[in-house]
Structures are given as C-alpha cells and as structure tokens.
Image (cartoon, rainbow, N blue to C red):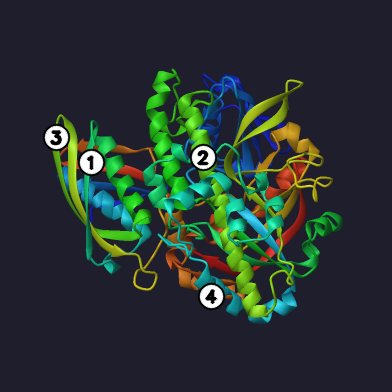
C-alpha cells in the first residue's frame, strides 16, 4: 500500500490505493509510531474511506490499532444528507469516556492514607464482571436517565448543580428516544448504574507533579496546582450500551442491502443517517451515551463520599469539582468548515476525543477563551494527560485527537508475560497501590502492552491539534 | 477441553477457536471458551439453570445468537455459567434448545477475569473439517 508522507506526523493513503475509496486516509503518527503501527489499521482506515458521504479524510489517531470496522483511533465525518451512521465507528461501549475530578488536597496529605482510600473505593465502586450498581431503578426511571443523562442524577442528589457545565454536551445528548432501545438492552443494563466494568476501565488517584505541569496558565484555569491530588474515572455505558450496539449491528447487517451499501467488513455495517434505521440507531445511541454520562456521575458521587469519609470534610470543602468529562466512543452532530463553507456533519470518534479550540460555543463558558480540556488515559503504570484543544484542530481533524496509549500486544500474550500478583507488587514498589477484582485482568493491562503515551501525545502536539497542560502520575488504582 | 485462545489476532480483545465432533459439542465448547474468558469456570457451581431456545436460518447466525444470549444473561441476571447441555435440530431452520447452568456472580467466590461486552462478527466462522465442526469467534472485551 502506498503511503505518502505529508509531514513528520501526518501520512496519507491516496484514493488510488483501494477501489471504492471516496477520500484519502490520513494517519497521525511519528515515523517511529508508523513503523510499529498495527497493519490492520491501514486496512480498516481505507475501508472507512469507502463509506458513503464521508467528508475530507478517513482519519486514524496515533494511538490507533485494529478494531471492529473502524480502527480504534478512527475519526470520520459524514454529510447528514447522504452520509451514513455506523456502529463500528462508535464502538460497543457507547460513550466510553474519561472524567477528571480535582481536589484541594496535596500528595503530602493523601499519600499516608492512600491504602485507606483505595480500599474505600474498592468497596464502594462496584467493578468487574457482572457487577451490580447500588442505585435500584425501575424501568421508567432508567428511561428517564436515557433522556436526561446527568440532570437525572443531579435531581436525585448524585452531584452538584454546576457539574453539568463541566461535561461534554452538558451530560446529555439531545434526541435520545427510549422507544428505540430493545427490552433486552434495558434488562441488561438496568442494574449496572454506577459500576466501573473491567478490562481497561479504572478509577485512578493521581498527582499533578510540578515538573509535569506544562502550561501553568491553562492549568490554573482548569483548576490544577502543583502536587495536587486528582481522580480520573474511565468507563462507559456498560451492558446497556453494549447491547444497543449489538442490536443495531444486527439491524444494519440486513438493512444495508436495502440501501445498496456494500462494505468490505461486516463490522462496518451502516445505514444512511437519513433512513429510519439510521435515525433509530442515533436515538438509541444517544440513550446509551446519556446513561454513560450518568454512570460516571454516580461513580463521582461515590468518589466524593469516599474522600469526605477519609478526610472528614465535606466534598465542597475539599473543592472536588469536575474538571471535565469527555466521550471517546461516540458520534456527534457538529458544524465544521468543509470546502470553505460551514456544514453540519456527523462526526464518528472511536477511541478518539473531541478537542475543540478556543471560542467554540460547545465549550463551557469558564473554559471558552482557552479551549476544551481533553483527558487522555495512559496505561496504569505510566499515567495520563490533561490537554487542551486548539483552533488548528478544527480544520485539521474535525476537532479530534487521540484517547489513550493504544494497545500493541494482545491480552492473551500479555497474560503470558506477567503474573497479576507480581505486577501488583512491582507497581507498589513504584508507588502505585492497586486493587483489582481480577488478577488476570490486571496482567492484561500491564504497561508493556501499550504504546508509549508520551509519544502519542507529542504527535498530536507537533501536529498542532492538542497541547499538553499536565501529566498526571498514578498513586492509587481500582480495576475491575 | 476442545478450544484454544488465539494470541495473534484481536489486540484489545479475546479470540478463540473451538471444535466438536457434533454441532452440540461445538456449541458447548464455544460457550465454555466464552465463559473461561470471564471466570475460572471450575470455580462456578451449577446451582441455577436457564433454558434457552433459539431459531436461525443460518448455522453461523445460530452460534452467534447462542453466545450473544449467554453474554446478555451474564449481565441481565448477573450469573456465570459453567455447564451447558445443548440440543440442535434442523427443521427447515436450525433450532437450538439448551440448558445453561451456573450461579450468581460472586467476587469472593469466583476467580473473575475480563468482562465480555459482545460477540463480534469479525473473522466469525463455523465450518466442518472432516469429522469435526470448528468455529472461530472474537469477543469484545
């Protein structure tokens, strides 16, 4: 496959390289990351380029690796009139995302009590296979959550009124319609509100070390200070979202024939956005996305309670505001400049994060002059990043950047290389206290199974798409 | 044990190949392989049973629906299964009647592993090679 170098960090596969490509594919990566790039990415990013109504380019971010239909790290925008919507471009875990919460506490205050904190969260935030949440819901209430998202939680006392301002879409995507989700999806997800899940999901206690605050001024606006303790939550819509995705993949698998769409990969099943099936899926996806926002909200409530219990102060006194909450498996209707004109498009981000620049109305007023906070998760051993979106991002990648490190090694292979209990010991020696429901699951998440997060983050900085604000070092971790 | 996990495909997920002398054996092994991703099935006692009935025109559709139903029940009822009794008939379409046995998930009792989100179509295949039925499945983790 011919790959042209556009710059040190942008590579292009021209439309001539695969029959049916409507736009070129663009991969954001350094030369080193390109050399190590999962071969499946090239196949998948060019398959996506063949989908009807795709605008400008089919993108893959530097954390890219093989996925279902779209690569993980895939970004693609489609015209609303004649473009498609594709569950593969969103993922099974609809609105898997990241939330970052601040505190007024320093590492000096928290370090002596880190084990206590980790134990409290391990007890109060259910994680692991089939975990049940502590919020008991009737079907009607669950449907309310699908429509209202975070607002439902705040009304019920799980959160503060101003929390909603610091969440992408204010914690609720409009257009959700519970009649478009199956009874199966409802019964699968109804007892899982407030659970973490497993795999690469986590609740992490972190420090903003002084040497890794890269932009002091933006950090201050975001509420970050030196040696500050923060908490990061990574999880999604749980069984509910997974079932919605499974249900609609089936629907689209047969519907595609009706619309004369042929895809190279069954997981790339799609339907015109403007079709009954496409509209139904969008409305169901919004339901799942809103439950994911609510899920993270309920977990944050537990985080606030936990800190309050251990430090004997109210969460408000501890300054435990949300910094921001971002979705990294989603499709959003956004206005972008295409061919010199403003156009409404459906942007799919699968394992990719929105990173809007300064002035955009979608960003909360408190951050609007600076740009959108972007939360990017590293492996549990290396830590994560807080970034800010840029003006350049808008024209470059439909305002999108990476979501994490990206895996390089299969779970099966990782488990063979390290034993969970030994990894846990090693992490403790490195200053990270971890409690995991599954030791095997922990082994699968070892740092060596992931790309180097700094390289990934630096790529998008060099490309001018997102800028580093702070690097966050883990000191405590809960895993499912 | 007539299944094995594949290391070289599916970076973020779990892939397996299962086989059986009969279709029923294959479906049983595929179900076991699916649950072994989530738990050491030896730690799961067969205390509750669920009856499952499915119909599909195509055999691959039937296998897909069978595994998807088990993944659904895992969340909807918070149960893990370790024993499967499967009967498959062809009556025009394929008809499956099965009993899955297991128990409610317990963090303390069960050696839990990774949660399965979904069965995917990726490289999904069921075929007969000589005496044996085989299947390849990739599960989203």
* Pointer 4 or 2: first along the chain: 2
Cα distance, mark 1 to mark 4?
46 Å
Element on which disc 4 rests: helix
State if disc 2 and disc 3 touch (CB < 8 Å). Answer: no
Identify the residue at image location x=62%, y=77%: A309
Looking at the picture, do discs 4 and 3 lie on one chain?
no
Looking at the picture, do discs 4 and 2 lie on one chain?
yes
Cα distance, mark 3 to mark 2?
36 Å
Residue A82 at x, y = what percent?
57, 19
Q: Residues within 10 Å of mark 1 (few under 14, many from 20)?
A: some
Cα distance, mark 4 to mark 3?
54 Å
Q: Residue A412: which disc?
A: none
Residue A305 at x, y = what percent?
61, 71
> Mark 4 = which residue?
A425
Q: Chain of mark 1?
A: B
> Mark 1 = which residue?
B54
> Mark 2 = which residue?
A285
Quadrant of res A248: top left
Say if A258 sits above or below B10 in the image.
above
Q: Chain of mark 2?
A: A
């Amino acid at each position: 496959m011919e790959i042209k170098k556009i710059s040190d960090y942008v590579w292009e596969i021209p439309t001539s390289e695969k029959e049916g490509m409507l736009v070129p594919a663009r991969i954001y990566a350094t030369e080193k990351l390109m050399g190590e790039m999962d071969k499946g990415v090239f196949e998948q990013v060019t398959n996506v380029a063949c989908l009807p109504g795709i605008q400008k380019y089919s993108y893959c971010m530097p954390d890219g690796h093989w996925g279902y239909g779209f690569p993980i790290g895939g970004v693609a925008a489609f015209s609303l009139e004649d473009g498609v919507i594709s569950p593969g471009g969103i993922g099974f875990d609809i609105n898997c995302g990241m939330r970052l919460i601040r505190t007024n506490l320093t590492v000096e205050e928290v370090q002596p009590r880190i084990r206590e904190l980790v134990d409290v969260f391990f007890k109060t935030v259910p994680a692991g296979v089939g975990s049940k949440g502590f919020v008991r819901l009737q079907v009607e209430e669950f449907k309310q959550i699908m429509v209202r998202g975070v607002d439902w939680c705040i009304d019920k006392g799980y959160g503060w009124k101003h929390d909603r301002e610091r969440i992408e879409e204010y914690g609720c995507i409009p257009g959700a319609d519970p009649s478009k989700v199956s009874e199966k999806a409802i019964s699968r997800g109804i007892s899982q509100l407030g659970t973490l899940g497993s795999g690469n999901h986590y609740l992490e206690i972190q420090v903003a070390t002084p040497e890794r605050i890269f932009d002091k001024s933006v950090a201050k606006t975001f509420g970050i200070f030196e040696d500050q303790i923060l908490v990061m939550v990574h999880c999604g819509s749980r069984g509910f979202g997974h079932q919605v995705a499974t249900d609609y993949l089936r629907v689209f698998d047969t519907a595609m024939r009706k619309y004369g769409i042929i895809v190279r990969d069954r997981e790339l099943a799609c339907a015109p956005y403007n079709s009954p099936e496409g509209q139904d899926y969008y409305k169901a996806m919004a339901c799942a996305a809103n439950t994911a926002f609510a899920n993270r909200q309920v977990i944050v409530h537990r985080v606030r309670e936990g800190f309050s219990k251990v430090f004997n102060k109210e969460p408000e006194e501890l300054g435990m505001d949300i910094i921001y909450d971002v979705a990294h498996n989603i499709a959003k209707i956004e206005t972008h400049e295409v061919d010199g004109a403003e156009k409404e498009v459906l942007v799919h981000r699968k394992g990719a994060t929105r990173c809007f620049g300064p002035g955009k109305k979608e960003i909360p007023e408190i951050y609007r002059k600076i740009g959108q906070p972007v939360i990017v998760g590293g492996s549990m051993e290396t830590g994560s990043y807080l970034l800010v979106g840029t003006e350049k991002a808008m024209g470059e990648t439909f305002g999108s950047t990476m979501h994490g490190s990206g895996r390089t090694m299969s779970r099966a292979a990782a488990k063979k290389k390290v034993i969970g209990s030994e990894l846990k010991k090693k992490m403790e020696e490195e200053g990270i206290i971890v409690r995991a429901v599954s030791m095997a699951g922990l082994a699968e998440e070892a740092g060596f199974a992931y790309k180097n997060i700094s390289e990934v983050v630096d790529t998008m900085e060099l490309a001018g798409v997102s800028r580093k604000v702070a690097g966050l070092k883990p000191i405590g971790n809960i895993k499912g | 044990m007539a299944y094995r996990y594949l290391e070289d495909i599916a970076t973020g997920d779990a892939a397996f190949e299962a086989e059986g002398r009969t279709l029923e054996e294959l479906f049983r092994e595929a179900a076991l392989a699916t649950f072994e991703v989530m738990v050491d099935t030896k730690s799961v006692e067969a205390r509750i049973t669920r009856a499952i009935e499915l119909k599909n025109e195509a055999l691959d559709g039937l296998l897909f629906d069978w595994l998807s139903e088990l993944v659904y029940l895992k969340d909807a009822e918070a149960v893990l299964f370790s024993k499967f009794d499967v009967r498959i008939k062809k009556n025009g379409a394929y008809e499956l009647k099965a009993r899955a046995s297991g128990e409610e998930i317990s963090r303390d009792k069960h050696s839990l592993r990774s949660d399965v989100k979904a069965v995917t179509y990726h490289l999904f295949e069921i075929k007969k090679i000589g005496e044996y039925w085989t299947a390849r499945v990739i599960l989203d983790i």
